[in-house]
Amino acid sequence: MAVRVQQEDFDLGAELLALRQGNPKIGAIASFVGLVRDVNEGDAVAGMSLEHYPGMTEKALERIVEQAKTRWAIFDALVIHRVGDLKPTDQIVLVAVTGAHRGEAFAACEYIMDYLKTQAPFWKREQTPEGARWVDARESDEQAAGRWHKP
Amino acid sequence: MAVRVQQEDFDLGAELLALRQGNPKIGAIASFVGLVRDVNEGDAVAGMSLEHYPGMTEKALERIVEQAKTRWAIFDALVIHRVGDLKPTDQIVLVAVTGAHRGEAFAACEYIMDYLKTQAPFWKREQTPEGARWVDARESDEQAAGRWHKP
Amino acid sequence: MITLLYFARLREALGVSSEQIDQPADVRHVAGLTAWLRQRGGAWERELAEGRAFRVAVNQDMADGTTVIGDGDEIAIFPPVTGG
Amino acid sequence: MITLLYFARLREALGVSSEQIDQPADVRHVAGLTAWLRQRGGAWERELAEGRAFRVAVNQDMADGTTVIGDGDEIAIFPPVTGG
């Protein structure tokens, strides 16, 4: 398991290759990349900056990955989340999960993203034509995380 | 939309970069890579060869992608499936989907994989210590595709 | 003339990958064609028996027993697919 | 001594990113601490009012009003998170 919070960009292909290398039991890699969009809630976005809570953020991400590993038969997971200044089309976050079969890999990957969105202390501040604004938390993200509680 | 059936390996990072380049509305890329495992149903697998039905295979994949695009608000999808001789840890298939938000991208990516598994004419032949064998279709794959029919 | 294609395990079991035949006079649907092929006996009778798991595509679209067959059609018979 | 940290919109609204204070004598839980901070008035009263959406972590774990606070704790107050 690896969890990284960094300013630098990441190389998706290299990260996924490193994650799976040396394990011929892996049959499936599900991954997700989040990107900065040039629009949000109808307004143009020229860029954003991402703040986090050093220490707690890494701990929260590690806990989310541990929970995914308890819940599904997966081999490994990687989470990379960038902080600092980003512009549209920049990569923000990578979540990748390896497993023997696709069902578990997909579910664990989506679970990690949903909990990251609601539990990991990151905050986005967007630059729009009307000035900078802190992004509001979305109720739909709470709902997405909440559905994993269902029996 | 792009669908490719090829013998050559693919470069995941380059493919995903090409898929998203030039569209700053993309906020999410969900992707899946299937790999050759060195074991299947308890037996060691030294390698496999993949046969397909040229013409129909591409057409079936294109239709599956079209159905995903009708069903979810996604931007684009890419499917690459290899044929010919492969060995453990080799990449078999890539499905990648771009969208504004993660929910649609994840769902469409998993949908395409589930239907590819049951509708696209590919057949695997594995080499095991007991000789070569055609891989049997799995009931669990039919069930995975079937769940998308639910209302 | 219709073209018949066989893939994967069925291609091996039947020992043929493709053939062109005149559409038999009384064969108008997929079910009629597979019944006609079974009459060849041996591997044909065994592999295409009722209850065996095989799929049929007509002109590269998945078909079932009721799908109509016409002159010039490309009809493929193959096992359940196992890609991905 | 307890350490208080503030992040993002709350850090800006309160004008402070961290402070160290003596644990107030009658404050034993998170709810007591936020009530005590509200008594500072102004932005504190406004931003930490009942019903406002803010989160509290104690020693880097998400907490709620009943979470116990002790000497040496690191307590962070921040808006709902918006990463990913």
Image (spheres, coloured by chain):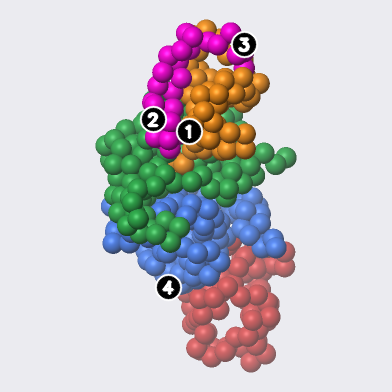
Chain colours: A green, B blue, C red, D orange
Question: Can residue A68 be spotted in the picture?
Answer: no
Marks 4 and 2 on same chain: no
Residue B44 x/y as whole percent: 49, 36
**Which residue is disc 4 drawn over?**
B55
**Which residue is disc 2 drawn over?**
D15
Characterize the local packing of mark 1: few (<14), some (14-19) or many (20 or more) Cα atoms within 10 angstroms.
some
Q: Nearer the viewer, residue A114 or D25?
A: D25
Query: Residue at point 62% right, 34% down?
Result: D50
**Which residue is disc 1 drawn over?**
D43
Query: Residue at point 48% right, 60% down?
Result: B122
Disc 4 from disc 1: Cα separation: 67 Å
Disc 2 from disc 1: Cα separation: 9 Å
Seen in the picture, residue D29 relative to A141 is either above or below; the reply is: above
Characterize the local packing of mark 4: few (<14), some (14-19) or many (20 or more) Cα atoms within 10 angstroms.
few
Disc 4 from disc 2: Cα separation: 65 Å
Q: Amino acid at mark 3?
A: Asp
| Magenta region includes residue A146 | no
Which quarter of the figure is the C terminus of chain A placed in? top right
Seen in the picture, residue B143 relative to D44 is either above or below; the reply is: below
Residue D71 x/y as whole percent: 52, 7
Range of magenta residues: D1-29
Seen in the picture, residue A77 relative to B95 is either above or below; the reply is: above
